[in-house]
Image: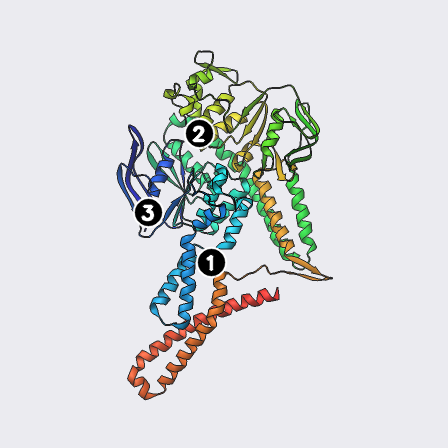
């Protein structure tokens, strides 16, 4: 039975139809990605699922006691509440259940046979298991660290930026674990490390999830089902983004040539996936196998850990591609450049050259200096130390604030400020509408003011405008934010056909893999590393290095003796409680069994109670005792292992 059903749902705003007679259901454990063009109804569908928006027709049916919660795009908080308190407030239900569980366990110590208490203890145990709420304080600490909120935990949450506030809300939601979690573009304002942590949490905790995202790797990692909104209807596909591409291509092939351009884009996308990603996955599998083998061998020969780390570091920095320093025009040269903002060192002793046809992704954690680097290239700020040279060429710049747009102008005036209705694009003279149709704008939008467009529409206009400029170098700051996947595909096609250099900041791993030929990885503390490896592969190696480092940190040498692990295993809170209470429970059952056995040997006793009833009770209590003893021995074995380590 589905947790939630939408039956024959229709929704329109005035005369604009959004959804028409659609059916939708969510089963426990499903992770459903909703795809579609911006303005096509994704957010509307999410709000109807959430119950915060009513449909014009149809029914929303939800199982009793099912809790649905949604990530708010613009969260609000109480006045003067700290970051930590804002997160903890989301966990009141779990904390209350944990307190009641502890109280019930205490009551059971003196009233073990009470059926009401036993039933309630089982209900609370299942609830806390489902929400993995046994050790919330440790989980809060981990989420604060992984979402870069630790330094703000005692600060007033309303003083943080919009992106930081969204991370606070997201942290509370994934710790609370509602029965159905709704996430609308959750990866916005997260760097790649935060995105990977979010992926791991959602998979490990077995969330039931409905989400909207333009991050195609994120979709592939999570989605068990993909739902596309197209022409007011829903179309269901099994699996993630890659499966969606294959099924969509088959569908479009079966229709007709009307979808030729879309089919062409999809074909390119799938060819790239098959050529690039699968090959890397194959290599990754081999490397991972070596890691596992060496971990086993390292138990007897710890020097192998260091050997593997050296090998992985070498592999991370080198690649099959060769760095070309041929006769291409030099755009930027830097030698021993340093740059700080306030007390924070962002660039330290960095040297590089950027050539005419380079495609460079600037990647790394939030706050590591990526935007500062772009400002250096744009000439907005200067270096503190070192040599920085810029050649004579034109730069086209896309920024997240879209400063190139004037909200008071309409779209036509924006593209044709001197009148007329035609633009030059890559040496080709085109009608504005014909050009903007490529960016999914209908003809009636031409007279719309920029100021009334949505964030995604403004991004599309800014990017379309950028590609009408004659420039030698494109500098793009998070160009895929607020874009839907069809528009990102179009953006990728324009970028790949651009003749000049491309330098861009992005957290979108898929976009980076597809566009970049070189990475500048901002590691923090001013360290910048160059790599010609695909970004997703670089991150995989980095993760393996971190795992090896953790493994190495959990070993110690004892003057020539064999190294051994230092407490890598811990008891969960639930196991700690069971370890305390199980001996008493076992003792009570053993006493009860002794009493039943004594009664069974005494005719006066068993005739009074009934022999069959006593025999049945004996069998039942013996089964309970066996289960408790087995559980206690299992925990005790773990305790002994911890002591040995």
Given contact means CB atoms under 8 Å apart, are the residues at marks 2 and 1 in contact?
A: no
Asked whether the viewer can see residue 188, the reply is no
Frontmost residue, 422 versus 451: 451
Q: Earlier in the sequence, mark 2 or mark 1?
A: 1
- Of all residues shown, which one is farthest toward the front? 80
Frontmost residue, 162 versus 643: 162
Q: Which mark is residue 134?
A: 1
Frontmost residue, 247 versus 163: 163
- Of all residues shown, which one is farthest toward the right? 560
**Where is mark 3, residue-wise?**
4
Can you give x and y, in whole percent of width and height, for residue 631 in the image?
47, 68
Q: Alpha-carbon distance for marks 3 and 2? A: 31 Å
In the rendered image, the quadrant that contains the C terminus is bottom right
Can you give x and y, in whole percent of width and height, for residue 118 in the image?
37, 67
**Where is mark 2, residue-wise?**
455
Q: Alpha-carbon distance for marks 3 and 1? A: 27 Å
| Residue in the image at 68% along x and 51% along y | 306
| Nearer the camera: disc 3 or disc 1 | 1
Q: Residues within 10 Å of mark 1 (few under 14, many from 20)?
A: some
Given contact means CB atoms under 8 Å apart, are the residues at marks 3 and 2 in contact?
A: no
Q: Earlier in the sequence, mark 3 or mark 2?
A: 3
Q: Is residue 122 left or right of residue 467?
A: left
Q: Alpha-carbon distance for marks 2 and 1? A: 41 Å
Can you give x and y, in whole percent of width and height, for residue 402 in the image?
49, 26
């Amino acid at each position: 039975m589905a947790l939630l059903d939408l039956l024959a749902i229709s929704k329109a705003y005035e005369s604009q139809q959004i959804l028409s007679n659609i059916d939708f259901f969510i089963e426990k454990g499903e992770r459903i990605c909703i795809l579609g063009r911006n303005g096509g109804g994704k957010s509307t569908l999410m709000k109807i699922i959430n119950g915060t928006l009513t449909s014009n027709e149809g029914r929303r049916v939800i199982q009793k006691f099912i809790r649905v919660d949604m990530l708010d795009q613009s969260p609000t908080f109480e006045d003067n509440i700290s970051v930590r308190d804002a997160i903890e407030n989301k966990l009141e239900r779990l904390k209350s259940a944990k307190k009641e569980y502890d109280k019930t366990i205490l009551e059971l110590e003196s009233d073990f046979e009470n059926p009401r208490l036993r039933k309630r203890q089982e209900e609370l145990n299942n609830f806390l298991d489902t929400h993995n709420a046994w050790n919330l304080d440790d989980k809060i600490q981990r989420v604060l660290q992984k979402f870069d909120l630790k330094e703000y935990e005692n600060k007033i949450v309303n003083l943080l930026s919009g992106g930081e506030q969204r991370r606070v809300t997201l942290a509370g939601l994934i710790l609370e674990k509602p029965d159905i979690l709704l996430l609308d573009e959750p990866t916005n304002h997260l760097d790649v490390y935060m995105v990977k942590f979010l992926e791991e949490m959602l998979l490990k905790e077995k969330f039931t999830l409905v989400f909207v995202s333009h991050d195609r790797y994120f979709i592939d990692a999570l989605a068990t089902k993909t739902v596309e909104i197209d022409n007011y209807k829903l179309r269901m596909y099994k699996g993630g983004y890659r499966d969606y591409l294959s099924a969509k291509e088959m569908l479009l092939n079966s229709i007709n040539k009307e979808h030729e351009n879309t089919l062409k884009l999809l074909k390119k996308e799938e060819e790239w996936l098959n050529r690039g990603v699968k090959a890397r996955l194959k290599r990754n599998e081999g490397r991972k196998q070596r890691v596992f083998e060496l971990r086993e061998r390292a138990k007897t020969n710890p020097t192998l850990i260091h050997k593997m780390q050296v090998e992985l570091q070498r592999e991370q920095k080198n690649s099959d591609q060769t760095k070309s320093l041929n006769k291409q025009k030099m755009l930027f040269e830097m030698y021993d450049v340093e740059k700080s903002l306030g007390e924070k060192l962002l660039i330290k002793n960095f040297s590089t050259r950027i050539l005419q046809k380079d495609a460079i992704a600037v990647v790394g954690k939030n706050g590591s200096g990526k935007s500062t680097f772009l400002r250096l290239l744009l000439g907005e700020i200067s270096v503190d130390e070192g040599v920085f040279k810029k050649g004579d060429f034109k730069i086209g710049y896309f920024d997240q604030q879209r400063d190139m747009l004037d909200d008071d102008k309409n779209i036509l005036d924006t593209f044709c400020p001197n009148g007329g209705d035609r633009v030059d694009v890559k040496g080709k003279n085109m009608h504005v509408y014909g050009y903007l149709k490529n960016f999914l704008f209908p003809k009636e939008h031409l007279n719309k003011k920029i100021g009334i467009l949505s964030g995604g529409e403004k991004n599309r206009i800014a990017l379309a405008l950028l590609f009408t400029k004659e420039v030698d170098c494109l500098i793009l700051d998070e160009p895929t934010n607020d874009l839907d996947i069809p528009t990102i595909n179009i953006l990728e096609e324009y970028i790949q056909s651009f003749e000049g250099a491309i330098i861009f900041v992005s957290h979108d791993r898929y976009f980076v893999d597809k566009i970049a030929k070189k990475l500048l990885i901002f590691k923090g503390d001013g360290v910048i590393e160059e790599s010609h490896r695909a970004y997703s592969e670089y991150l995989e190696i980095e993760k393996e290095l971190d795992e090896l480092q953790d493994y190495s940190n959990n070993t110690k040498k004892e003057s020539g003796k064999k190294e051994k692990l230092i407490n890598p295993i811990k008891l969960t809170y639930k196991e700690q409680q069971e370890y305390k209470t199980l001996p008493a429970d076992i003792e009570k059952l053993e006493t009860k069994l002794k009493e039943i056995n004594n009664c069974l040997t005494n005719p006066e006793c068993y005739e009074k109670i009934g022999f069959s009833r006593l025999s049945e009770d004996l069998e039942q209590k013996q089964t309970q005792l066996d289960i408790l003893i087995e559980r206690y021995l299992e925990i005790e074995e773990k305790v002994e292992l911890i002591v040995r380590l």
